Amino acid sequence: MFQTRHRIASLGTLASLLLGGSALAQPVQIFEEAPPLELLRSIMVPESRPGLSRRIVLGQPDPAPSSYAAPVAAPAPAPAAQATAAMPEPEAERSAEATPRRPRRAPAAAVLATAGNSLPLPAPPAPAAGTIGFRINFALNSDAVPPTAFAFLDRVAELMRAEPQVKMQVEGHTDALGADAYNLQLSQRRAAAVANYLVERQGVEVTRLVVQGLGETTPLTENPYDPRNRRVQFARVD
């Protein structure tokens, strides 16, 4: 398994070099101290945040007017010289034009079906989970997790106990100091050490963790030698 992962990661490093260097990592929230559980949950499990449901409420239609609208005033009479030419309109036609029409009302069944109903809007797409990172000060050429990192990892384990459906990818990263192959191997060992801590010290199921070493291939900063690129990241695995 280790040899297979090593081979895959080596191919990724080679492809990065052929394309002209390392690509910057996607936006990552780096913490200098252990974040609160709820903050961690809001980043890694954003769908767990409570939200208000959006609804459209249909009320009763406007009531029909209690009286008809006043008849439209008749046009001014024609001049006297042409009065004899105007023929009187039949009484039936005049009464039809003068009588306003009653507004059409919806059938009673339709009103009952829509009045007071609440129709939910289509649910918005679920927000994407983020990625978090911790700067773990490993000793030179060492993959032993230092005690200063325990608070970080204990908080991750707390989140995984609270959200049993969540799986995590543990990523090891280095800066560009040293040979590529060495950095790749070192990042794999350190990511595995972090995963072992979560399994052995915190009881996280090993099937919920995926270990990956990325070496120097995805720096956080433009300067690949920046020590801030030395980190361990956790990404949500769906």
Image (tube, rainbow, N blue to C red):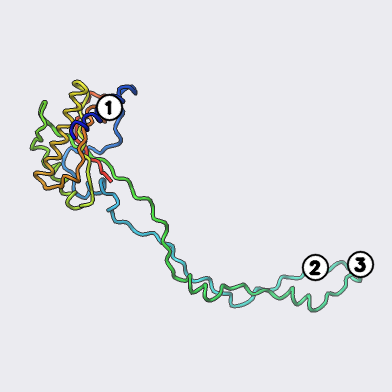
Gap between marks 2 and 3 measured at Cα: 14 Å
Q: Label 2 near label 1: C-beta < 8 Å?
A: no
Quick one: label 1 or label 2, which is nearer the N terminus? 1
Q: Which residue is mark 1?
A: 11
Quick one: label 2 or label 3, which is nearer the N terminus? 2
- Disc 1 marks a residue whose amino acid type is Leu
- Disc 3 marks a residue whose amino acid type is Ala
Quadrant for residue 136, please give it: top left
34 up-or-down from 61: above or below: above
Q: What kind of element bears circle 2?
A: loop
Of 19 and 125, nearer the camera is: 19
219 up-or-down from 71: above or below: above
Q: Which residue is mark 2?
A: 76
**In the drawing, does residue 42 fall left or right of residue 56?**
left
Q: What kind of element bears circle 3?
A: helix
Q: Position of residue 31 (x, y in %)?
A: 20, 39
Seen at 19% across and 43% down, the residue is: 209
42 up-or-down from 175: above or below: below
**What number is the disc on residue 81?**
3
Quadrant for residue 18, please give it: top left
Gap between marks 1 and 2 measured at Cα: 93 Å
- Disc 2 marks a residue whose amino acid type is Ala
Q: Label 3 near label 2: C-beta < 8 Å?
A: no
**In the drawing, does residue 114 fall left or right of residue 3?**
right
Mark whose residue sits in front, 1 or 2: 1
Seen at 80% across and 79% down, the residue is: 91
Q: What kind of element bears circle 1?
A: helix
**In the drawing, does residue 144 fall left or right of residue 235?**
left
